[in-house]
Image (cartoon, helix red, strand yellow):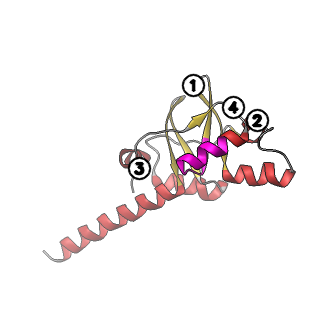
Amino acid sequence: MGKVRDILKFKGGAVFAVDPSITVYKAIEQMCERNIGGLLIVENDRLVGIFTERDYARKLILKGKSSKDTMISELMTKNPFTVTCDSTIEECMGIMTEKHIRHLPVVDGEKLTGVISIGDVVKQIIQDQKAIIEHLESYIHQ
């Protein structure tokens, strides 16, 4: 099975990150502009949290808070689970399933190198399975 580096090779290492001092409203605007479901929160070049649509729904809307008056640092998930480029797709699936999360920041030591989503993982699994099937079909026809 593939590794996180395989996903990043195809997807690229672009990371959309914001400072913890911005408002939730500004974060949601950025998520909308980029058509993404989560933002990484970085302070002094260090990953300090992640903010997702789920955080917005559960921690802001249901608590009656205002997105224009609430800082992202109040709602972000602190110290998010992370993976490395050497993590396997199987490990990522396990973390995502067990922890009920859809985004995993990718780090190299303390350096943020990317982020993968559950959609990225599913695409990689499909590509891996397709390659296996093609290999087996080629073997059978020899």
The stretch of residues the image draws in magenta is 27-39
Residue 32 part of the magenta-drawn span:
yes
- Rounded to the nearest angstrom, the CA distance separating label 4 from label 1 is 12 Å
Q: Residue furthest right?
A: 64
- Helix, strand or loop at label 1? It is loop
Real-space Cα separation, disc 3 to disc 4, in angstroms? 27 Å
Local crowd size for mark 2, using a 10 Å CA cut-off: few (<14), some (14–19), many (≥20): some
From the viewer's perspective, is the residue at label 3 or at label 2 nearer? 2
Marks 3 and 2, how far apart in space?
32 Å
User: What mark, if any, has residue 7 been given in the picture?
Assistant: 3
Q: Nearer the viewer, residue 58 or 111?
A: 58
Quadrant containing the N terminus in the rendered view: bottom left
Q: Give the mark toward the camera: 3 or 4.
A: 4
Front-most of 11 and 137?
11
Choose the circle earlier in sequence order: 3 or 1: 3
Q: Earlier in the sequence, mark 4 or mark 1?
A: 4
Q: Disc 3 or 4, which lies upstream in sequence?
A: 3
Looking at the image, which is closer to me, 54 or 138?
54
Graded by Cα atoms within 10 Å as few (under 14), some (14 to 19) or many (20 or more), the crowding at tag 4 reads: many
The residue located at (61%, 22%) in the rendering is 44
**Residue where numbered disc 1 is placed:** 45
Q: CA distance from mark 3 to mark 1?
A: 23 Å
Give the residue at mark 4: 20
Q: Which residue is mark 2?
A: 71
Determine contact: label 4, label 2, CB under 8 Å: yes
Is residue 81 in sight in this rendering? no
- Choose the circle earlier in sequence order: 1 or 2: 1
